[in-house]
Amino acid sequence: MANPLSFQQIIMKLHEFWAAQGCVIWQPYNIQVGAGTGNPATLLRVLGPEPWRVAYVEPSVRPDDGRYGENPNRMQYYYQYQVILKPDTGNPQEMYLRSLEALGISQREHDIRFVEDNWESPALGAWGLGWEVWLDGQEITQFTYFQQAGGIELNPVSVEITYGLERIAIPLQGKNAAWEIDWMYGVDANLKYADIFLRSEIEHCKYYFEVADVTGLRNTYDVYEGEYRRALDAGLVIPAYDYVLKCSHLFNVLDTRGAIGVTERAGYFRRMRDMTRKIAKAFTEQRQEMEYPLNKMASTFAPINTAPARVDSKTALAPVIPADFLFEIGVEELPASDVDDALNQLQAAAPKLFDDLRLAHGDVRVYATPRRLVIAAKEVAPLQTDIEQVFKGPSADRAFDPDGNPTKAGEGFARGKGISVSDLTVEDMDGGRYVVARVKQTGRPASSVLADALPGLVAGIKFGKSMRWNASGVAFSRPIRWYVALLGGAVVPFEYAGVQSGNLTRGLRPYDSPEQVVGGIDEYLTVLEQQGIILDREARREFIREQVVHIAATIGGRVLDDDKLLAEVTNLVERPTALLGRFDESSLKLPREVLITVMRDKQRYFAIENAQGELLAHFITVRNGDADHLDLVTHGNEQVLRARFADAEYFYSKDTQKRLADFLPRLGTLTFHEKLGSMLDKNERVARMVEGIGSLLHIGETDTAIAQRAAHVAKADLATQMVVEMTSLQGIMGREYARLSGNPPEVANAIYEHWLPRFADDALPASPAGTILAIADRLDSLVGLFAAGLAPQSNADPYGLRRAALGVIQIAVQKGIDVDFAQAVELVAKEQPIPVSAEIQRDVLDFIAGRLRVWIEEQGWIYDVVASVLAAQSRNPARALQGIRELSEWVKREGWENTLDGFARCVRITRAEKEQYTVDPALFVQPEEHALYAAYQTAAAKLTPNGGVDEFLNAFTPMIPAISAYFGTGKNDGVLVNHEDAAIRRNRLGLLQAISAMQKGRADLSHLSGF
Amino acid sequence: MANPLSFQQIIMKLHEFWAAQGCVIWQPYNIQVGAGTGNPATLLRVLGPEPWRVAYVEPSVRPDDGRYGENPNRMQYYYQYQVILKPDTGNPQEMYLRSLEALGISQREHDIRFVEDNWESPALGAWGLGWEVWLDGQEITQFTYFQQAGGIELNPVSVEITYGLERIAIPLQGKNAAWEIDWMYGVDANLKYADIFLRSEIEHCKYYFEVADVTGLRNTYDVYEGEYRRALDAGLVIPAYDYVLKCSHLFNVLDTRGAIGVTERAGYFRRMRDMTRKIAKAFTEQRQEMEYPLNKMASTFAPINTAPARVDSKTALAPVIPADFLFEIGVEELPASDVDDALNQLQAAAPKLFDDLRLAHGDVRVYATPRRLVIAAKEVAPLQTDIEQVFKGPSADRAFDPDGNPTKAGEGFARGKGISVSDLTVEDMDGGRYVVARVKQTGRPASSVLADALPGLVAGIKFGKSMRWNASGVAFSRPIRWYVALLGGAVVPFEYAGVQSGNLTRGLRPYDSPEQVVGGIDEYLTVLEQQGIILDREARREFIREQVVHIAATIGGRVLDDDKLLAEVTNLVERPTALLGRFDESSLKLPREVLITVMRDKQRYFAIENAQGELLAHFITVRNGDADHLDLVTHGNEQVLRARFADAEYFYSKDTQKRLADFLPRLGTLTFHEKLGSMLDKNERVARMVEGIGSLLHIGETDTAIAQRAAHVAKADLATQMVVEMTSLQGIMGREYARLSGNPPEVANAIYEHWLPRFADDALPASPAGTILAIADRLDSLVGLFAAGLAPQSNADPYGLRRAALGVIQIAVQKGIDVDFAQAVELVAKEQPIPVSAEIQRDVLDFIAGRLRVWIEEQGWIYDVVASVLAAQSRNPARALQGIRELSEWVKREGWENTLDGFARCVRITRAEKEQYTVDPALFVQPEEHALYAAYQTAAAKLTPNGGVDEFLNAFTPMIPAISAYFGTGKNDGVLVNHEDAAIRRNRLGLLQAISAMQKGRADLSHLSGF
């Protein structure tokens, strides 16, 4: 068998391939860049309207990724292969896959996956949506539709394809690490990657991590920023940009050296972003002045799409009897969550579409996979239902003269409605006789109305993040590449997002997405089924679950429950084939959570444990495709995991060389917020709050002392390499490292628990110490960030304050902690480095109350009951929920209307009063007044200061007869509150005010319906 | 016809080509470098013993070459293609030529020439010998055998091939400028080089020349140097080296910005060289520690040479009768001057070789071309001449006992000489009888002794600069690639410099140097003649001269006389074919000297003028090869000249935007010598000397004033771009620019003349003003540099002080200026910024005197006459030569022996006296004394203070009879000088001393032979 391509042959082959696609073959930049994106051939050329296609190698320098040559595929220096297609070619994924074939990587033999990736570079003011491309689990390419660069919206959008050459060469050559790659084949020996780079890699790591001089490089950054400015002021865009790149590299070095402090970091990013923005603006203007010279290359870089319309000879006539309707939106791989989002929306939108269009129809089913969104409707009527519209005209005597001849008004009305005067009728209507026009609207053909409506249907699907890709400017989760739209056997013709509808679907990705003409739902389903595509999400999920469970059982294990992972995997594949991989037993010495997190978060692998709950050195992953060459795919995935675990082991060993507390200084370099200091500052603030919060929560000394001890290192793990790499391990590593540093388990545990709850259904802190920290930490965030002006906006909540508020609420409520958050907030406010006004504190409390209401309502409590209680007591969530629970019972009781009505009468008559009146029994005139007063005194005596709704209503209910008598019944007239004597009137109002006030701090029954 | 390769295709084709030659295909460096040499894949990998082959593109940044995009092929940013072959492959030139063929550049259709180039990079501590490769007059490649890098002697030597890609693409694509190059072919339009780079080029030029901030970048240099040091101290070679490259780029920017001052410049170079040296040392040590891992690649990078021995079936037996001897040393293109050197040496060495070897021979002829050194000897004897050696043994009576039997001594002697006792003879010798051994040595076969001797012959050829290239370690002007060594038809077998002798010659380069077996001289000459190779230098030169004259005549012009150029061109080609090119008439507006200099110095073109002496817009160049495709070659050369003239026009227009005096500040940035200040300092010093020197030279006020005015800007043109680019135009541009700046013609002219004479046969300053400056400037150099300790050493005369001294002498002598240089030197010494002792002044004068003697002797004056005069008067060359001229006549006169003898007698008898005695006529005793004294007085009265040799001898000759009488003749005894009375003796000596002193300041006749 021929040798696989050597590293240098891979590069040459890619050059050949992309040159044949009309790409300019470019050279690496002669300034250190972190990625090919930094090369002006990308960052500047994607700006503006001119077309461009380019391909080049880019040696990329990322000091922070250095591993001293110990990791199989992570290095501070590596080779990217960068391709830019501007505008979108319509088939960039297919072009890319063909390039892999050219290298010898067959879709059929491997598992090549497009896995959601949202790319962003704050320093470059750039972002885009796309994917990581996975080859047997290994990320080998970043594939991005560039939406913005240098802060400028891109039009046209550019496709950026960034190959990681080492990660392609490793599996291609069957190596275990980049170091083993054959750069070139020789006669007796091959030149290995390590032969050229290993020593240099180790040296650079040492330089970046240990040697670089912070002061000098910092000064150089300033000098270079100055040069950027001088150059740009002189209109010299490229020289200026070169200095931006140099600044960026210097920043990376300083950062890796651990030299970037709290306020500096954000500052540096702002400076770099600002520079890039100005460069982008200047370049754009320059190109405009030059009148876009590259437009001459349009026929090369932006050839007109001459793809055949996706309709062929099977085209049939529109149906005249009810027929099946098939609609498939063919897309490039959607993110897993977008598959769900689209499915949910279509489930509602599809039936509504037919109803709105007055199209009778049978069963409507909706499907979604990463590559297609499908509506299959049975028996759709060929025509819309007819309808008659009735229009009321002038009165009969104005429309017709006494002789019954139409007047001008009558004629005009008929003409206006498009009917003849003779078709007007006279009818009784609205208490008079009027001329009436009955206009009949005949239903249009289904095909035609669907053609009109389908663009709107597609446009109506909304995503969390969407992107543009072609000249249509339409935004969608990922590019739409085809539609199948068939009514009966006939295409429903429309165009949207630059794509025409047709009858051609595309098959399974690893089969090279074969195009196939389909005539209707059945044929369509058969075509997909033949390729193993499981269209139905639930069916796909269950199929995966079965396979996974089965495979785990073959090695005597069981997979860890993880519905979220299962749901995600379900949306990553169309034809799921699970496989079992193994990893080295020695990796099991890493903490369990680390292993699981790596497998799940990084690789979407299912972890397996044995009957004792111990992890096994195996994993299960799900390939998209059939079982052919599964060994290759398995091997590839195992290699990937090996590299991942090697990285984790590297972090773990680096981290455990120190004590947890040793990370505190580095914590000082992580910004919490510019105005609020570093994470270390926050950590220390929380530590200062422990005692106060503990006391408010009624927690004892021992537990408070534990909390105190934990508080000092609670955030320290954020500065560990493991957590920097995998944020989701925060707290978990804190606990682990605290333990290894010799802390007692309860302290270690409190560190872990202080992060709880991390998400909606997460556990709450179990220990009192953890509870103190969890609440203190969240309140610190809320109060501090509100004071810094960062209260969440409608859609923006970058600091997760909603979740923080919910966290405190959940803890307080579910642990039944009786605490007045007003006090807690006040205490926390005092520790902030910036002033926190009373108003801000109130805002925080209102914000928490808002979250509380939403949360409680979500649990199904009746709206008005919730509103009633929270209006009176939102500062203490536990008690509030108790009140809601109680009031909910009251409103269900028999006679409640009576009770409510009685109370409401007291409230209603007094609520306009601005003044508070006192009650003087000497001024009572009528016996009913005396009686009510007595009843009130009896009831009031039953109320305690911390009593709840029950106490209030239990006290109040016995007063009903007295109240009824007071306001008068059928038998007597009762008391006239608005007595002409002002003193009497006020006295009477005073009594009713006192009764109204009985609900204070418990509820405000005026929010109840029926009040 | 297919398109020529696009720029990107050229690169890919070269990658393919060199990959197939076993090269690692490498990437450009991600740090700005001035050349591919800076990439560590060259600079570091050439160190140490490990083999290496690499090829890569290198975008090269040379800020100073920026022309704001106005030059067709000179830019601050351009693309090199770099190849390193380590060790030498034995055929790197042929590999290179094949790579050009691969690009579509045929040797047959173009004029591809290897033109001597000695490459040196002080900053990199690197040098090598090799060539510029010219394609139709355009330098397209630098081809160097690397001898040293980072201050370390390289072993093995690496071959470095650096293509200038733009300069290859321009002719290949038939373009006029780099900007027009098709980088890539498109559908409706091609992507031009200008589309990508023009704007960036202009911006970078503006940045480098006008915008860059000197202070900031200077500081950055220091920071980076610090980083280099930190990294190297930590053993981090590559990171340290990266900073050297960054420093180097910063230096280039600062330099281009005009920011590097006098002392700084040398300092920067020293710093960079020092850094590179330490890096090289560290890298070398590191590789040694690693045990040279790339040695494993030997079979790929350094394949064992399996070339067939250059001896084939025509091999004949060694001759037994006198036969022709042919010896050809086949070399890669020798520098023109080395062709001459080798030829001269072989002309002496070849006959001597046969004589030394005792080989009788007929006519011996020697030839040389750039590619071969040839000895053709007729009728060489098949055997050495026999010889007999005679050895004297012990005395006869010790060797034989009285009975005539040999003693032990006798036997021992015979045995020692390898003969039997019976062959001993007894002979009379040295006044006694001795035993004698006569040993006969029979001549060895010629073939065998030649085989032994030829290596020594080759080794004996010495060159000004020589180089190593292969493992033999032999040094030669350029690599030796083959030998033809034939005696009769038989190969004389030997090996030297790693090359074996054979019978295979190689033909004309443009015919791809076809290999051909030859049987002897006649066949050899026929083979070469068939390819048009003219082996004989004179014949070649005359053939060129004829063609050039003829072609010039066809356009009614004549070529400018230039024997030096003709001689050089003669040694650049084997088959000369002259061709006529034209250039744009508009270029004629440039000064004539500029045009000529560009054509001659840069291109080796002959300039043509019309009958009126005006330059024509034509040139003649001589191609190596036949007349095929002469149009292509002509077109190429025209293009090259266009670019050259464009550059000259650029300089001219930049320079003439200012007045000449405006260049003085920049002159302050050019170092003359660290201790002596800048060129501006020198210029000002000379200006201060003008009056004094003028007065010493007896030059009038008007002319001195002109000199004064010229002096202030005499060196200013050194700071102009034109002169920076073409040093030989110094003075010429000074004159031109002075004129344009409004100076009177005589001032402008003095500026020009102050450089005269520039070389041996150059004109002398014609004007008095020019004379003052020329002498002052040279004396300033001599005195200053001697004082700075830079008197020329045996071979080293970096400041050209020999030429300076000769210049002053030539001016003084040939213009007959009567000046005492001792006074001038004293005057000049006073203006120096460092002390100049009397001893130093004397050294300078002696140095001038030494040059004077050599110069005069070279003119054929008799040695002893010269010595006599110079012993008395070397401080005033003009008078000295006059004296020599006079004395030369005297020594030829009849009776001169008598005259000389008379004078000599006076001198000889007194010269041992340490004391000077007076003459008192009262102490005269004999009449001869009185007579001589009277004769002396008569003669002395004829002597004037500034009189010369004639005056002295005319005065002296009449004294001869008195002298003869004084010392006695046959008739009388004469005077006894050594009288016993001391007073009388002293008085007599005193008279003779006075007579002896008559020659003082005129000559010292004791140096004459026969004295």
Image (spheres, coloured by chain):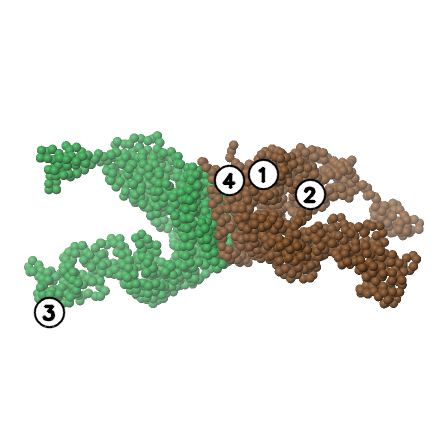
Chain colours: A brown, B green
| Image coords of residue A525 (percent x, y) | 70, 35
Of all chains, the one bearing label 1 is A
Q: Say whether residue B912 is visible.
A: yes
Q: To which residue does mark 3 refer?
A: B922
Of all chains, the one bearing label 3 is B
Of all chains, the one bearing label 4 is A
Asked whether the residues under marks 3 and 4 belong to the same chain, the reply is: no
Q: To which residue does mark 1 refer?
A: A617
Q: To which residue does mark 2 refer?
A: A340
| Image coords of residue A881 (percent x, y) | 74, 52
Q: How many marks?
A: 4
First of labels 2, 1 by sequence position: 2
Q: CA distance from mark 3 to mark 1?
A: 134 Å
* Residue type at tag 4: Ile
First of labels 4, 2 by sequence position: 4
Local crowd at mark 1 within 10 Å, few (<14), some, or many (≥20)?
Answer: some
Question: Could you tell me which residue is drawn at 9 percent across and 62 percent down?
Answer: B975
- The quadrant in which the C terminus of chain A is found is bottom right
| Image coords of residue A865 (percent x, y) | 78, 52
Q: CA distance from mark 4 to mark 2?
A: 41 Å
* Residue type at tag 2: Asp
Seen from the viewer's position, the closer of residues A896 and B41 is: A896
